[in-house]
Amino acid sequence: MFVFLIRRIAASIPIILGIALVVFFLFNVVGGDPALQMAGKHATAQRIAEIRAEYGLDQPKHIQFVKYLGEIATFDFGRSYATRQKISEMILNGIGPTLSLAIPAFLLTTFLAIVISLLVAYFRGKWIDKTGVILCVIGMSIPSLGYILFGQYILAYQLNLFPISGYDYSLAGRFEFLLLPMIIWVMLSVGYDVRYYRTALLEETNQDYVRTARAKGLSEPRVFFKHVLKNTMVPIITNVILEIPLLILGSFLLETFFGIPGLGYITIDALNNSDFPVLKAMTTVISILYIGGTILTDLAYALVDPRIKLK
Amino acid sequence: MSTPAVISQDVSSAVGAMPKGRSLWSHAWDRLKKDKYAILCGSIIFFYAMVALLSKLGVIASPWDKVVGASYAPPSGESFEMWLGADIFGRSVMYKVIHGTEIAFGVGFVVACISVPIGVFFGAIAGYFGGIIDELIVWFYSTLSSIPNLLLLLAIAAALGKGLHAIYISLIVTSWIGLARVIRGEFIKHKSRDYVIAADSLGATHFSKIFKHILPNVLHFVILNFSIQFMSAIKAEVILSFLGVGVQGEPSWGNMIDEAKLELARGVWWQLTGATVAMFFVVLAFNILGDALRDALDPKIK
């Protein structure tokens, strides 16, 4: 397993280099002159030259790229243009809120999705099933913005059930602010998961061994929960594990709307301020975290399915 | 002893008694036609497309910025324009929704039409030729897909500036990857199949093998992917416009929802409802149609 990890990490290096290349290409080559973007329309020539010198933009491109690789390796991206904070600090500060929202929401979604899909697959064909599927498809089709805006307006503003936005860094205080975004996250994701698990469960029930079990006289609950469920755990767990890397992305929209100062919020903020150093750093770091997530996913997947051997 | 003429007659009468061969396509089309929901959704999408086209040609809902009522006038039944009320400048929300349809379908169509061929091309040559070409292409799309989608879209939009063209480019760059992966897998599978080897032994060129022989066998993925990409492009445009990096100056569903943020505080719900409902039905229709397409094209379900 150790060898597997080493190999996977080694295999990610060219990808990470590729990402650095793409980010660099976008922001330093394609994206107009970063110094001009950051300085804004009314800057003096001197200000622009200062920015250039500070961010090393006056050097030839390949040197800039090497410098950028160095920044990634040492996790020091300099300072944000808009807020003058150390970017690495901003990132570390942002991880807490993002994960506080993402992890509980993810666990809740997974739990609900498994329970609902079990119900729906057990009563396949009956009205519970049909209603469930319809609700899922509808849930998937409502734009996330719709959920957020209606949710904020009706539940938070009119009915006063939740705070409209904001965040509290203390461990206990934060959950009050995370509750509504969590609910919205769950409603957004549950539909997709339930349909997927339902399909997997139903495919299992069509297998020959299920027919044999029923022919043997086993009761339906026994057949379903003891046999079908166990064999479906692999695709279910695979799906669950595959969703973990996406947690890092948090939800850009939810964080922005509810004022939760996570990684997504910082990124959107930087976007609005044309804060290129932050955008570059965010894109690179989030992508690297995402790759890390996929490696963990592969590891966990191999642990779950005994047929898969790690190489 | 039978003469050749008699033999061929026997053969042809025997052939006449055999059922006519059915291709995957005619099977799929039959199944699709029988599915009421699929037909319904197809009609809904067709309706939207017609609205978009008419709007683009200027036949309906033009000009969209004509003032039709008081600022924030609520919906009323007095005229078609006022069915969804007016926005802050007194412009018809109904007209804006229709204009938004034009933008949404434009984006979906352009992005899907360009990124599908790109995806097929890269997937095909990667899967077919293998070797260094394969490694390069796989490295390229693995890199792009390791950057979370929304993040990449935002980064491209930030770099290219705002506006419709940036959206087109960023959506195209991110959309071709999924199809390329699938097509590459299929080509790898088909490359060593008998019929390809047979074509090869008959002297078929690479070009002919790729386009004439293997490609028709993977077209169903392409069609499915086209509809998925169309829908994803629409959803992405809404989110990008909402975040401020999308369409500028013209109403799109995303822009309208963005404006609605502030309007809600004043109790003005009609712009949000119009855009959200319009989007909801088209996304729902694509979801259901996509499922039906997948089921119809699946050879295992008979």
Image (tube, rainbow, N blue to C red):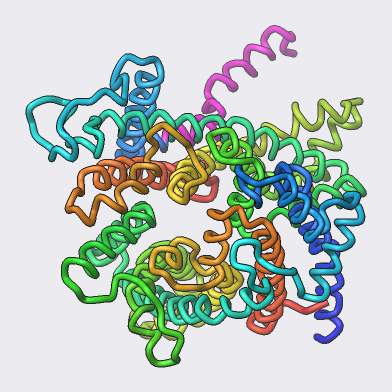
Q: Is residue A186 above or below residue A267?
A: below
Magenta-span inclusion, residue B152: no
Q: Is residue A41 above or below residue A103?
A: above
Q: Quadrant of residue A193?
A: bottom left
Q: Is residue B19 above or below residue A165?
A: above
Quadrant occupied by the C terminus of chain A: bottom right
**Main secondary structure type of the part rendered in magenta:** helix
Residue stretch in magenta: B1-30
Q: Is residue A254 above or below residue B254?
A: below
Q: In the image, what residue occupies the spot 56% across and 76% down?
A: A94
Q: Quadrant of residue A126?
A: bottom left
The percent coordinates of residue B58 (x first, y second) are 36, 15
Q: Quadrant of residue B41?
A: top left
- Relative to A63, is A26 on the left or the right? left
Front-lying residue, B175 or A55: A55
The percent coordinates of residue B229 (x first, y second) are 54, 42
- Relative to A141, is B194 on the left or the right? right
The percent coordinates of residue B288 (x first, y second) are 38, 46
Residue B294 at least partly seen: no
Q: In the image, what residue occupies the spot 31% across and 42% down?
A: B275
Front-lying residue, B199 or A302: A302
